[in-house]
Amino acid sequence: MARRPFPRILSSGSARITRGREIARTAADSATDVLHPLIIVSRGLGKLAGLARRKWAATPKEKRGPTLLVVAGCGLAVALVPYGPAMALASVMAAAAWQGRGRSTAKSGPDEAEAGRLTALYEALVPYFSTPDDPAPLYAHGGSWTDAFHDYAFDGNGRLTGLRISYPAYFTDGEDESRARVEQVVHAKSGRGREYRFIWDEEGNELVMSVLPALSTAIAAQRFITVPGETVLGFTDPGAVQRTVPVVDGDETRDAPPVIWRTGPRSTEPHLLAIGGPGSGTTNLLRSIALQALPYGDVLIVEGAGAGEYSCLRGRPGVLAVECGLSGALDTLQWAVQETERRLVAANHARQADRPLPEDVRRPLWILVDRPSVLGHLAAADGRSDPQELLAVPLRHGRAASVTVVVAEQFDSLETLTETVCSHTRARVVLGPAGFDEIEAVLGAVPHTTPTPDVPPGRGYARLGIGSVLRVQVPATPDPFDGATSDTHRQAVLGLLPEHHQRAEPVPAQAEGV
């Protein structure tokens, strides 16, 4: 099917001149290739040499010795075969000719439709990158984009996928409002429905725009290679973090860059807050955290919505309680307060006696609270205290007592979160469709990418403390008892769950008498 060209914006005379130059250049290249076949071979040899250098640079140092041995053995075998060197030389020349054949058909510039898109974007940026007092404006109505735009790239539909934009030094690139206006224009003119990354080089007066590929949604719940105290919140873009872990992604195993959240006594972000809309994947995130926490610690779950999303965890070893009702939630959280205080006292006594911390103090305790606003509303109607008030002690002193609190809430109930919850949850995650204002309200910073209105469940942004904002895709961890869950995901979650107790264990004895 022929591609529908973008409406022409260049004048017909200028378009004809540009097209004529491209045709003349292509004809000259074809004539050169026909008259001088050695140019084709030498060009191909250069490409082959570059490919060999890249392969060698990508080879780990510990594998370079065996690789050299294999190459030397192959060379010796070829030399011993009759006519081997001649055949090898002929093969290399044929490969070089094949690699060097493509110059005559190579694209030397944008076609008419692509040039039209670049011109439209250039004209749209003129009001932002020009002033009346500039004696030699880089941007001017009716001007040329060739000096302002570099390294442009288009996809098969003729839409921009990459561009480096030069702008004048007097542009206020240090102001967020100025940057946001330019990014909005570039985003709109390059095509909506995709996620763009903008990198500002204030020193070089350049803006680099690139289209980000979609994060994989095929990574399901599984055992991740981490150490105790590390939790994989999800996976992000390659190069955004300095670490990768092997994961099963669909039918293949590959290395993926994780968003690692570190907890424990030395963590600077010991507690986490996850915000999203209905169906955004916050409950999915809490289930994923619980499955990763169970091999090393104990888990308390308080579900405000009461939908039974965590019923698969009931009675499992390490799961101390899964509470949905108001009375059970208050009793469970009251026990968590007492347990935190007990751990603090035991740790203090051990340090005073120069003894190592007891095992029950070192063992992590996780408190997962989903939709506390619902329980707060029920408590207010019943004249009882808000369950969030009972989170104050674990939030303030949990790091020293190996107690971690994770709270998940929805955007429409964000204002119901207490000051203590907001101030002590320094690890933040936003999932689902959200605008810049909503993301900044939760994370304290805006991402360097453009949020899209349609995202799959579990897709969003994460920020740990004062770090950078990262795109994140949470591993698929659905409720295995939900009829809509696929059999692959159901088996993946059930395979991570510990075997059932003979009977469900109650909340430990410290909670008695509450």
Image: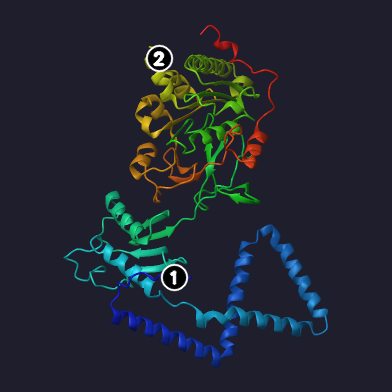
Mark 2 Cα within 10 Å, few/some/many (few <14, many 20+)? Answer: some
As drawn, the label of residue 3 is: 1
111 or 388: nearer the viewer: 111
Residue 3 image point, x, y percent = 44, 70
SS at mark 1? loop
Q: Is residue 83 above or below residue 491?
A: below
Residue 397 image point, x, y percent = 47, 22
Q: Residue at the spot x=81%, y=75% of the render?
A: 77
Q: What amino acid is labelled 2 in the image?
A: Ser
SS at mark 2? loop
Q: Residue furthest top?
A: 513
The reply, left or right, for residue 79 in relation to residue 433 is: right
Residue where numbered disc 2 is placed? 385
Residue 19 visible? The answer is yes
Q: What amino acid is labelled 1 in the image?
A: Arg
The reply, left or right, for residue 131 in relation to residue 146 is: left
214 or 128: nearer the viewer: 214
Q: Residue furthest left?
A: 133
Residue 8 image point, x, y percent = 32, 73
N-terminal of the pair, mark 1 or mark 2, is 1
Residue 422 placement: quadrant: top left
Residue 125 placement: quadrant: bottom left
Residue 275 placement: quadrant: top left
